């Protein structure tokens, strides 16, 4: 069970990380060696942003590729696997890396969103789940704590905090706007495994167009440049995944806990606050054609996420398949169910009797 769980964990975290919580990748070709924390040689499709200028100024922000020396490798190909070997452990590991991140996010949400911040309904059985993993000296309690909120502009603000000891830590923090706004999705993915860390931070575009990039990516490029200096590009990713990234995408694999506690934390803070700046400035769309485009893009994206979610294997082994499917469709990507039940209308918060909660929930 432990071996199978670790393979599923690796598939889940790489997919979630390289897509910045905006679109998981199909990982049928990924085996236990494919998720090494470093590819010693690769052809890296890097997020090198460039601007083409004309008389009107900025006309494009794009992804471009550059080659690194060495044998090309891509996600899904074999590597040594030494960095994620089951017996590998980080030296002087920090056992609770991401609680400070969540505490900061909770404070910022309350301060900046104020009275507009309301609780978002989480199924009772999904608020917190625990399981014992491993055996002998490796036995550990693994917990998944969920948080969710909503505002008049943001349909769902959610976080999943997975804690399984110093060598398995995940904070998955995502914000989905209401369907009457063309805002991007915010994805902050922080993952720690025995061999190191997988970090993806981005404001995922709803549309791929120069006008959309100029509106939402361009204001983030100075911030991206500031953090890219300390968080080097994490390696290759598939061509099919490009549609889910913005030019301001941060994808990195630091080896040191101290880098996560400093450089990653600074980046996390800046992207969260910048996104909330964009939310502050956002105005609702009223054109019926534009609203239909937004609806189509959001539903297609969420359907893809729910169908391809590699967390399914990890959670199924931890908590069982029935709970897992309910968690994926009834909480993580619940918009289709809410629309089908007639419970959701753009810009209208869902009723929720639960109080605002920013702290771990005791298991009954």
Image: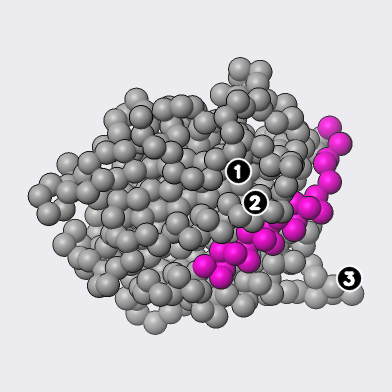
Label 3 to label 1: alpha-carbon separation: 36 Å
Q: What residue is at 41 percent from the left and 27 percent from the top?
A: 125
Residue farthest toward the left in the current orientation of the protein? 136
Residue 294 in view (yes/no): no
Image quadrant where residue 237 sits: bottom left
Magenta span includes 266: yes
Q: Is residue 96 left or right of residue 64?
A: left
Q: Which residue is mark 1?
A: 157
Q: Which residue is mark 3?
A: 56
Whether label 3 touches label 2, CB < 8 Å: no
- Mark 3 or 1 closer to N-term? 3
Question: Of helix, strand and loop, which one carries label 2?
Answer: helix
Report x, y in % for residue 317: 26, 37
Q: What residue is at 27 percent from the left and 38 percent from the top?
A: 131
Select label 1 or label 2 by which is in front.
2
Q: Which mark is residue 352?
A: none
Q: Is residue 204 above or below residue 150?
A: below
Select label 3 or label 1 by which is in front.
1
Our reading of the magenta stretch's main secondary structure is: helix
């Amino acid at each position: 069970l432990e071996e199978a769980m670790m393979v599923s964990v690796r598939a889940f975290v790489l997919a979630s990380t390289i897509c910045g919580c905006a679109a998981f990748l199909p990982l049928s070709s990924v085996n236990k060696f494919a998720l090494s924390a470093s590819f010693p040689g690769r052809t890296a499709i890097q997020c090198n942003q460039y601007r083409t200028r004309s008389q009107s100024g900025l006309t494009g922000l794009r992804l471009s590729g550059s080659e690194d020396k060495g044998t090309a490798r891509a996600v899904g190909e074999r590597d040594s696997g030494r960095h994620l070997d089951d017996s590998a452990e980080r030296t002087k590991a920090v056992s609770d890396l991401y609680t400070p991140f969540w505490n900061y996010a909770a404070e910022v949400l309350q301060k900046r969103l104020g009275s507009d911040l309301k609780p978002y309904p989480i199924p009772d059985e999904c608020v917190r789940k625990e399981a014992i993993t491993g055996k002998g000296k490796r036995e550990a309690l693994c917990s998944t704590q969920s948080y969710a909120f909503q505002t008049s502009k943001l349909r769902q603000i959610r976080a999943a905090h997975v804690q399984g000891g110093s060598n398995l830590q995940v904070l998955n923090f995502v914000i989905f706007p209401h369907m009457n706004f063309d805002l991007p999705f915010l994805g902050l993915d922080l993952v720690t495994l025995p061999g190191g860390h997988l970090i993806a931070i981005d404001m995922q575009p709803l549309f791929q167009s120069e006008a959309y990039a100029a509106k939402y990516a361009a204001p983030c490029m100075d911030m991206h440049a500031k953090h890219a200096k300390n968080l080097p590009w994490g390696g290759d990713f598939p061509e099919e995944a490009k549609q889910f990234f913005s030019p301001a995408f941060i994808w990195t694999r630091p080896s040191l806990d101290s880098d996560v506690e400093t450089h990653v934390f600074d980046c996390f803070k800046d992207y969260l606050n910048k996104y909330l700046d964009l939310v502050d400035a956002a105005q609702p769309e009223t054109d019926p054609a534009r609203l239909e485009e937004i609806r189509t893009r959001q539903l297609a994206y969420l359907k893809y996420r729910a169908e391809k979610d590699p967390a399914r294997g990890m959670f199924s082994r931890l908590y069982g398949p029935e709970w897992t499917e309910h968690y994926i469709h009834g909480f993580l990507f619940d918009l289709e169910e809410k629309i089908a039940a007639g419970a959701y209308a753009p810009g209208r918060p869902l009723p929720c009797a639960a109080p605002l909660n920013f702290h771990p929930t005791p298991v009954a």
